[in-house]
Image: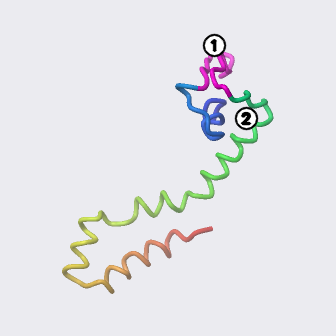
């Protein structure tokens, strides 16, 4: 992650609030456009760390989304096999990718 992603995590809009640039020495804030105070480097660094932690802690959600059958397949299973069979399918995915 970089400064721009940290600012976005803090709720700033990359179109309205800031312009970042990278001249080959890393990303920096070229221009601050927001009416709100510009966050300090420490605040941005902490936001980047928080965003990375959140991303890591929610990996199970992305894994589950990839493992679940499509909605069409789920509805088809419910129609042909009943709700209990569908619940078993969903429970198996949740068991394979549990919440931390």
Q: Nearer the viewer, residue 8 or 53?
A: 8
Residue at horizontal 73 percent and vertical 28 percent from the top: 37
Q: Which residue is mark 2?
A: 44
Q: Quadrant of residue 13?
A: top right
Q: Nearer the viewer, residue 65 or 43?
A: 43
Residue at horizontal 65 percent and vertical 46 percent from the top: 52
Which residues fall within the magenta stretch? 17-35
What is the number of the mark on residue 23?
1
Residue at horizontal 75 percent and vertical 41 percent from the top: 46
Residue 38, x across and y down, in percent: 73, 27
Indicate the secondary structure of the residue bearing disc 2: helix
Residue at horizontal 20 percent and vertical 79 percent from the top: 79
Please tell me whether residue 84 belongs to the stretch shown in magenta. no
Q: Earlier in the sequence, mark 1 or mark 2?
A: 1
Residue 4, x across and y down, in percent: 62, 30
Residue 20, x across and y down, in percent: 61, 21
Q: Nearer the viewer, mark 1 or mark 2?
A: 2
Q: Quadrant of residue 65?
A: bottom left
Please tell me whether residue 26 belongs to the stretch shown in magenta. yes
């Amino acid at each position: 992650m970089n400064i721009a992603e940290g600012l976005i995590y803090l709720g700033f809009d990359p179109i309205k609030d800031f312009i970042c640039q990278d001249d080959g020495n890393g990303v920096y804030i070229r221009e601050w456009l927001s009416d709100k105070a510009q966050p300090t480097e420490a605040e941005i660094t902490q936001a980047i760390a928080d965003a990375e932690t959140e991303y890591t802690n929610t990996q199970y959600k992305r894994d589950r989304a990839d493992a679940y059958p499509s909605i069409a397949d789920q509805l088809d299973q419910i129609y042909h096999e009943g709700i209990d069979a569908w619940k078993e399918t969903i429970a198996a995915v949740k068991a394979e990718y549990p919440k931390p």
